[in-house]
Image (cartoon, rainbow, N blue to C red):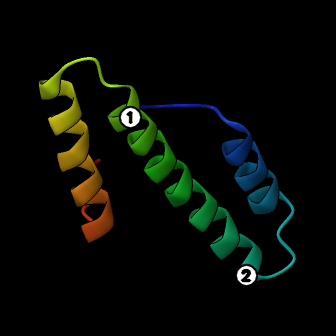
Amino acid sequence: MIMNTKADKLADYLDDHARSELDNEAAALLRELNKVYAVAREMVYARTHEHSKKAYVEMIDLIKGKRGV
C-alpha cells in the first residue's frame, strides 16, 4: 500500500534538510510508523474476514521486521 501522507512528506523534509544522522533516523522511523498505521487502518476497515486476516498477517510481518511488505 503506497500512501503519500503527511508523515511521508515530513520524512522527506527531514531527509532533505538533515542536520545530523538523527534527522535521517527520524525520517526512517516516520516511514516505518506510517506503514504500521496504514496496515492497522486496513485491518480496522476490512470488509471481509479474508481481507482482515491478510492485513493481520502483514502487520505481523511488519512487527517482525520482514522487508518487502
Residue shown at 23% from the left, 46% from the top: 56
Which mark, by number, is residue 22? 2
How far separated are the C-alphas under marks 2 and 1? 33 Å
**Image: 37 above or below 29:** above
Q: For this rendering, which residue is in front, 40 or 28?
A: 40
The circle on residue 11 is none
Q: Is residue 11 left or right of residue 19?
A: left
Extreme residue in the top direction: 47
Q: Position of residue 42 (x, y in %)?
A: 38, 32
Q: Which mark is residue 44?
A: 1
Please determine whether, in this image, residue 12 is positioned above or below residue 39: below
Q: Is residue 19 left or right of residue 23?
A: right
Q: From what the image shows, is residue 24 above or below residue 46?
A: below
| Mark 2 surroundings: few (<14), some (14-19) or many (≥20) residues within 10 A | few
Query: N-terminal of the two: label 2 or label 1?
Result: 2
Residue at point 23%, 58% (across, down): 60
Horizontal side of residue 8 vs 10, given as left or right: left
Q: Position of residue 37 (x, y in %)?
A: 50, 47
Q: Secondary structure at mark 2?
A: helix
Q: Where 68 sits versus 61, above or below?
A: above
What residue type is disc 2 on?
Leu
Question: What percent of the width, then of the height, locates residue 66?
Answer: 24, 62
> Which SS class for mark 1?
helix
Look at label 1 and name its amino acid. Val
Query: Residue placed at 72% from the left, 82% from the top?
Result: 21
